[in-house]
């Protein structure tokens, strides 16, 4: 008891907290953001407009938010996580009915100068609420079926809402991010094994039924799945993006074509070059060295978050850090796999690099939570 | 209790740590997979993708070569490339398309349909693609648009090249025409030259334009441009200039050709004038003609239909494609065959009583009452058929046809024109193979007067005449030089014919035009140095039945046009020092002496004088009508009179 009291007593207070921030994380995040600014500058043809300036402003706002969130004790965030989850659900429902249609899906909430994507917010609040849930219940009962049900519902509601938008990428991120927290909380692996097996069996059954009498999907649905899995079958439609982005990546070679020298992006062969496909420009201009460096920095950020999770004895803080690490990882892993032709094209941005305000600010706020966990960890 | 609680906490904390490490491991593994994929794309397949990126980026644009110019033997331009003044419009530069088009239509006459089509095209294509609004503008219209350019945003006056035939119809049967590249053309020629992909590219479709396509076309140049994904040109990287097609000079004399066409006009006729020293074709005329410029622009179907259905067949080249029974113009060959075989003495006479009986068939002379006693020269001068029936029986068809081929009849001559006819110099073998019947003596008799199976083109008859006049084994030549270099013609050799025998034939031909009873006497010339020697021919296109002959042969004037006889004349001049040989046919013209000989005489005179001959060259009683005809003719203005003399010569300095 005295030991833990001592630990709590050593938690810094006041402005001293600033010294206890996880400064390496701040540095890495800034590096990634700067890489992002460079790439946005390049794809704009060597101009600060239209993307670098707004992105830098949001980065500043996001960093400020991160510091503010970091200063507030992690216990407070545990208390408000249920509320945050509820708010993001309400916002998701709100955009379902009143949202602004953009890029063929209802995603935005127009807040005057801001445009908020509630689905981005939901990625963090789901992690928070699950972490709070598992910090609250008796750890012996995590694998009890009755205690499995609430987190399942908590995950599936926002997944369902984002799927309806339809935003496959976000739904996937919510599902896997939430799943990571559930996994980290110690739910028996047999549940996961069963789930994966059941999922695999379903997919297998669906594909096995193709061309038989008991075919489970219509032919056109199969064809849609085909082009989704292998876009090269449709080189001028769905496959165009992926073919062109692979050309850009590959033509970068080992050391790249040089800053601002990427022909694929400069000549508009790349789609969405400033958002989801910005990694291709980086890979084209800085080659294998640049691309793998970014991957390495991302991995370091994830490692720092996991280190925070391991070094705190607070269950909520630990699960939260892990969940945020997993969500961040899912962002860049899915994005990179997508542009490299390893995964179907779903709309997931490259975190902190792709142009997009909500994603950047929400991510920085999430890292603020990790920082809070870092500063306020019981030692 | 607290202890177990703490124990439980440590258990769950340890499990969380384990799970966290498992998660970290999973993430690291995934990152390794991603890095491996990066390595595969960026290191192993970098070269492939680099290539694909270049293919994306760089577009090869072909630059059309200018087609070689075609000149006549003196440097007059027969076919060249005229600037085609066009207006193109770029939608994104225009702003208000309709407003600009409305302004434009106030300046130049715009075709409504074409305008609508251009507008549709503009709207359906990317906004930066230039679309042709109008072409073939006059220079005035073009400059009007250029001057008003500031008020016409997005409008660009532009100059392309299009084939132009300044002499129009005079050369349609020689130079031919070009046309757009059609699918049919690509299929039939198997031509894969990338230059054919250029929009509006023109290829030779007929006559010299088609036969010398390889020479005239040139090689496409190219420029490499960087384009963006939408196809917009960002900048030009480099270019290699197009290689212009070679210029071709023909042996034709444009003024003589012009005169020949003018002289033949109104008839369905063909004529060939050859140089008797070199074999150069100086004129190759066929009437009626058509304007080859019509074909360049895409001929309207109504005009094409008119040309195609005209009974005078303007689209056919009668000089090279037409095959006609040569009639009496074949008699020199028959006589020479007999002389060369040593079967006759030129002074030996044959009695012509108007016809000859062969078996149960009667072969008539054209002169009902008969010619009386005829020797060779008289037989030729008066074109006595019976004399040749007699000769033919002695010589036989094989020797006649062999002699015909030696003189270029029934032989295909290699001139670069479309559809050059081979003709027929029949032999016994030929008839058996083609008609399935054995040769009979009657066939020989028919052949001896150029009827029956014998068929020749005017070109072949011109070659025959030139060879008779010169004693040289001349081949017709149409190409004087290509890119300034004369083609490798075989040197001209002498014919393997006795000069003495040839002299007898020439004497006969002289008598035709100048003898008291010559069939072409009325078409003679009277100046000593410009006399003509020749032979008339009248070939039947119908059989004259015994009944008709008994009642009196129907005169040509009383027959429908298409059943009248063909009129022919072959000849050369000056008679004593031949330089020009001619063959001329007037389809269904009636008699050779009346319908063909005067035309041939006039063309020969024009050739000898290199211009309209003085009236003194004509018999006194014809001068008045000749003068009237000359006044009525609309001929090409002679160079030197109005034009600067060297305007064309400069272009030919390379030749």
Image (cartoon, coloured by chain):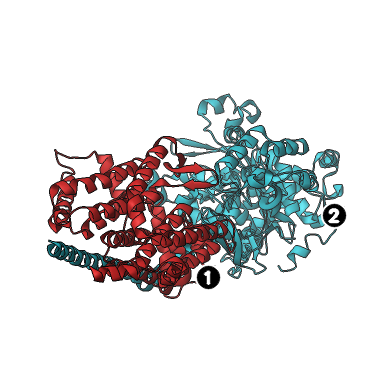
Chain colours: A red, B cyan
Badge 1 crowding class, 10 Å Cα cut-off, few under 14, some 14 to 19, many 20 or more, is some
Check residue A345 in the rendering and tell me which mark sits there, or answer none: none
Q: Which mark is residue B643?
A: 2
Of B649 and A157, nearer the camera is: A157
The image shows residue A31 at horizontal and vertical percentages of 46, 69
Whether tag 1 and tag 2 are in contact, CB under 8 A, the answer is no
Q: Chain of mark 1?
A: A
Q: Is residue A326 visible?
A: yes
The spot of residue B309 in percent (x, y) is 57, 32
Q: Residues within 10 Å of mark 2 (few under 14, many from 20)?
A: few
Which residue is located at x 48 percent, y 44 percent?
B453
Q: At 33% from the left edge and 41% from the top edge, which residue is drawn?
A: A161
In the rendered view, would you say B189 is above or below B588?
Answer: below
SS at mark 2 in the image: loop
Asked whether the residues under marks 1 and 2 belong to the same chain, the reply is: no
Chain of residue at mark 2: B
Look at the picture and state if B535 lies above or below B46. Answer: above
Q: Nearer the viewer, residue A118 or B360?
A: A118
Quadrant in the picture for residue A314? bottom left
- State the image coordinates of residue B139 (x, y, percent, origin top left): 78, 47
Q: Which of the two residues, B221 or A135, is positioned nearer the viewer here?
A: A135
Point out the image quarter for the N terminus of chain B.
Answer: bottom left
**Foreground: A69 or B173?**
A69
Query: Secondary structure under badge 1?
Result: loop
Q: Is residue A100 left or right of residue B243?
A: left
Separation (CA) of disc 1 from disc 2: 65 Å
**Label 1, on which residue?**
A259
Q: Position of residue B326 (x, y in %)?
A: 57, 45
Residue B520 visible in the displayed image: no
Q: Quadrant of the C terminus of chain B?
A: bottom right
């Amino acid at each position: 008891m005295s030991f833990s009291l001592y630990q709590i007593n050593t938690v810094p207070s006041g402005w001293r907290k600033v010294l206890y921030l996880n400064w390496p994380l701040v540095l890495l995040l800034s590096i990634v953001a700067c890489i992002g600014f460079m790439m946005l500058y390049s794809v704009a043809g060597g101009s600060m407009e239209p993307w670098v300036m707004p992105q830098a402003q949001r980065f500043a706002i996001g960093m400020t938010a991160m510091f503010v969130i970091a200063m507030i004790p992690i216990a407070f965030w545990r208390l408000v996580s249920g509320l945050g989850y509820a708010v993001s659900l309400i916002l998701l429902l709100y955009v379902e009915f009143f949202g602004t249609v953009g890029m063929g899906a209802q995603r935005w909430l127009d807040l005057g100068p801001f445009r908020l994507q509630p689905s981005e917010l939901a990625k963090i609040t789901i992690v928070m609420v699950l972490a709070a849930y598992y910090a609250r219940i008796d750890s012996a009962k995590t694998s009890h079926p009755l205690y499995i049900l609430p987190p399942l519902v908590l995950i599936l509601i926002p997944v369902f809402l984002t799927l309806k938008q339809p935003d496959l990428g976000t739904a996937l991120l919510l599902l896997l991010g939430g799943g990571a927290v559930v996994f980290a909380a110690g739910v028996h692996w047999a549940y996961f094994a069963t789930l994966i097996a059941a999922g695999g069996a379903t997919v297998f059954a669906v594909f096995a039924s193709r061309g038989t009498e008991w075919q489970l999907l219509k032919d056109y649905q199969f064809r849609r799945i085909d082009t989704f899995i292998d876009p090269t079958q449709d080189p001028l439609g769905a496959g165009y993006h992926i073919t062109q982005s692979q050309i850009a990546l590959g033509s970068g070679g080992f050391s790249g074509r040089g800053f601002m020298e990427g022909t694929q992006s400069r000549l508009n062969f790349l789609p969405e070059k400033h958002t989801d496909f910005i990694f291709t420009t980086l890979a084209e201009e800085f080659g294998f060295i640049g691309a793998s460096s970014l991957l390495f920095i991302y991995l370091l950020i994830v490692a720092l978050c996991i280190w925070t999770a391991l070094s705190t004895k607070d269950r909520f803080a630990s699960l939260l850090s892990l969940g945020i690490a997993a969500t961040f990882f899912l962002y860049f892993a899915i994005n990179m796999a997508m542009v490299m032709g390893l995964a179907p094209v779903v709309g997931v941005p490259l975190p902190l690099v792709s142009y997009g305000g909500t994603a950047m600010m929400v991510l920085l706020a999430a890292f603020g939570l990790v920082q809070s966990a870092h500063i306020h960890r019981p030692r | 209790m607290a202890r177990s609680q703490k124990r439980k906490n440590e258990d769950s904390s340890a499990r969380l740590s384990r799970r966290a490490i498992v998660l970290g491991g999973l993430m690291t593994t995934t990152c390794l997979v991603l890095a491996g994929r990066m390595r595969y794309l960026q290191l192993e397949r970098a070269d492939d993708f680099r290539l694909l990126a270049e293919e994306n980026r760089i577009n090869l644009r072909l630059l059309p070569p200018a087609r070689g110019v075609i000149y006549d033997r003196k440097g007059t331009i027969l076919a060249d490339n005229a600037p085609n003044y066009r207006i193109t419009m770029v939608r994104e530069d225009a702003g208000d398309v309709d407003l600009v088009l409305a302004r434009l239509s106030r300046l130049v006459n715009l075709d409504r349909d074409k305008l609508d089509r251009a507008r549709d095209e503009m709207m359906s294509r990317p906004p930066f693609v230039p679309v042709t609004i109008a072409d073939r503008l006059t220079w005035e219209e073009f400059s009007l648009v250029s001057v008003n350019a500031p008020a016409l945003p997005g409008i660009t006056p532009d100059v392309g090249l299009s084939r132009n035939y300044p002499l129009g119809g005079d050369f349609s049967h020689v130079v031919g025409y070009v046309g757009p590249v059609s699918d049919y053309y690509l299929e039939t020629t198997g031509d894969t030259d990338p230059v054919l992909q250029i929009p509006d590219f023109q290829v030779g479709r007929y006559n010299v334009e088609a036969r010398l396509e390889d020479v005239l076309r040139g090689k496409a140049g190219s420029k490499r441009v960087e384009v963006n994904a939408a196809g917009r040109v960002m900048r030009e990287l480099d270019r290699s200039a197009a290689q212009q097609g070679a210029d071709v000079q023909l042996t034709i004399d444009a003024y003589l050709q012009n005169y020949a066409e003018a002289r033949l006009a109104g008839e369905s006729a063909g004529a060939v004038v050859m140089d008797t020293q070199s074999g150069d074709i100086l004129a190759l005329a066929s009437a009626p003609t058509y304007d080859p410029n019509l074909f360049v622009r895409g001929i309207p179907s109504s005009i094409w239909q008119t040309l195609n259905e005209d009974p005078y067949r303007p689209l056919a080249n009668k000089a090279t494609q037409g095959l006609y029974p040569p009639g009496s113009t074949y008699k020199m060959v028959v006589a020479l065959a007999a002389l060369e075989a040593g079967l006759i003495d030129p002074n030996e006479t044959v009695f012509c009583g108007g016809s000859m009986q062969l078996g149960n068939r009667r072969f008539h002379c054209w002169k009902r009452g008969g010619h009386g006693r005829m020797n060779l020269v008289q037989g030729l001068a008066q074109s006595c058929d019976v004399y040749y029936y007699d000769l033919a029986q002695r010589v036989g068809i094989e020797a006649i046809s062999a002699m015909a081929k030696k003189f270029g009849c029934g032989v295909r001559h290699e001139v670069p024109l479309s559809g050059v006819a081979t003709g027929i110099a029949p032999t016994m073998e030929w008839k058996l193979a083609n008609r399935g019947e054995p040769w009979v003596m009657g066939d020989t008799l028919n052949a001896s007067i150029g009827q029956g199976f014998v068929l020749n083109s005017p070109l072949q008859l011109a070659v025959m005449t030139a060879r008779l006049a010169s004693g040289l084994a001349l081949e017709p030549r149409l190409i004087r030089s290509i890119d300034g270099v004369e083609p490798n013609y075989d040197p001209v050799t002498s014919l393997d014919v006795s000069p003495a025998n040839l002299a007898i034939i020439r004497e006969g031909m002289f008598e035709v035009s100048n003898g008291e009873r010559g069939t072409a006497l009325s078409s003679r010339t009277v100046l000593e140095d410009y006399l003509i020697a020749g032979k008339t021919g009248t070939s039947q296109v119908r059989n004259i039945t015994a009944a008709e002959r008994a009642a009196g042969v129907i005169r040509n004037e009383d027959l429908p046009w298409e059943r009248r006889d063909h009129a022919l004349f072959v000849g050369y001049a000056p008679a004593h020092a031949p330089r020009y040989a001619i063959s001329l046919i007037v389809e269904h013209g009636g008699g050779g002496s009346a319908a063909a000989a005067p035309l041939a005489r006039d063309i020969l005179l024009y050739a000898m004088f290199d211009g309209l001959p003085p009236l003194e060259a004509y018999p006194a009683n014809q001068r008045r009508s000749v003068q009237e005809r000359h006044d009525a003719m609309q001929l090409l203005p002679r160079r030197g009179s109005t034009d600067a003399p060297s305007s064309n010569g400069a272009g030919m300095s390379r030749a």
